[in-house]
Image: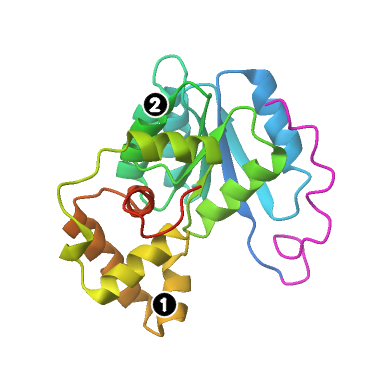
Amino acid sequence: MAELSAVTTLTDGYAGGVGQPDGSQAIAVFLVDDHAVVRRGMRAFFEMLPDIEIRGEASDGRSALDQLAVMAAHDELPDVVLMDLLMPRLDGIATTKAIKQQYPSVEVVALTSFSEAERVHGALEAGAAGYLLKDAEAEQVVAAVRAAYRGQVHLDPVVARKLTRSLVAPQRTATALTNREREILVLVAQGRSNRDIAKALVISERTARTHVSNVLAKLGLASRTQAALWAVREGLVPGA
């Protein structure tokens, strides 16, 4: 990751995280990439941030799943997995799918290259919550991890445009939604978490979660990311 050295300003003015005055929990991150130099760079980068803790790393998907199984047995699962998509033995898409099936609370942020729109679309289907290009700025990497931890989606602008163009819209339209569900869809497309949606609409977080599930079911979508891209495609919110 070419921009990992440009991280010295990321901690400036930041408040929150483990070891800080508010005593909040750090975001536990697990790194998966088949290039040791990339893993070292990412580890050095994240270790500079007060709110992120590296929980472990793996060189391929199979090794990642093996290590996560051990961590789950000790109740030490990470909050976010930063996942390379192109790896030997088990690629990032298959690994993401397995993680989301076995450990639904673990979020995955996928890494890809400019020419891999199809692979990113596959990662979206598998349940990834973030998508970055391999040459992403350091600020984008940490923003994606923090967004995933908050239950939000972070897309690289180039990837977002590619996916929006390539997304096959479901046969159902926004007319299938109630007015409240349309409000929910717009907020999801804006990257709002269930908690944010609840506050904005003065409803409980459980009700917000139920509305989001209903929106996905009515539109035949599998994830919040798909819902966001669908809303952009349908003109409900401005595109990237």
Q: Amino acid at mark 2?
A: Arg
Q: Label 1: which residue?
A: 198
Span highlighted in magenta in the image: 1-22
- Estimate the x, y position of residue 31 in percent, counting from the top left: 57, 34
Pointer 2: residues within 10 angstroms few (<14), some, or many (20+)?
A: some
The residue nearer to you, when weighing 152 against 22, is 152
Q: Residues under labels 1 and 2: Cα distance?
A: 33 Å
Horizontal side of 40 relative to 143 (left or right) equals: right
Give the mark, 1 or 2, whose residue is nearer the N terminus. Answer: 2
Residue at image point 24% right, 62% down: 215
Q: Magenta segment: does it hold 15? A: yes
Q: Residue 25: in sight, yes or no?
A: yes
Residue at image point 41% right, 53% down: 105
Q: Residue 119, labelled with which disc?
A: 2
Q: Is residue 91 above or below residue 110?
A: above
The residue nearer to you, when weighing 15 against 212, is 212
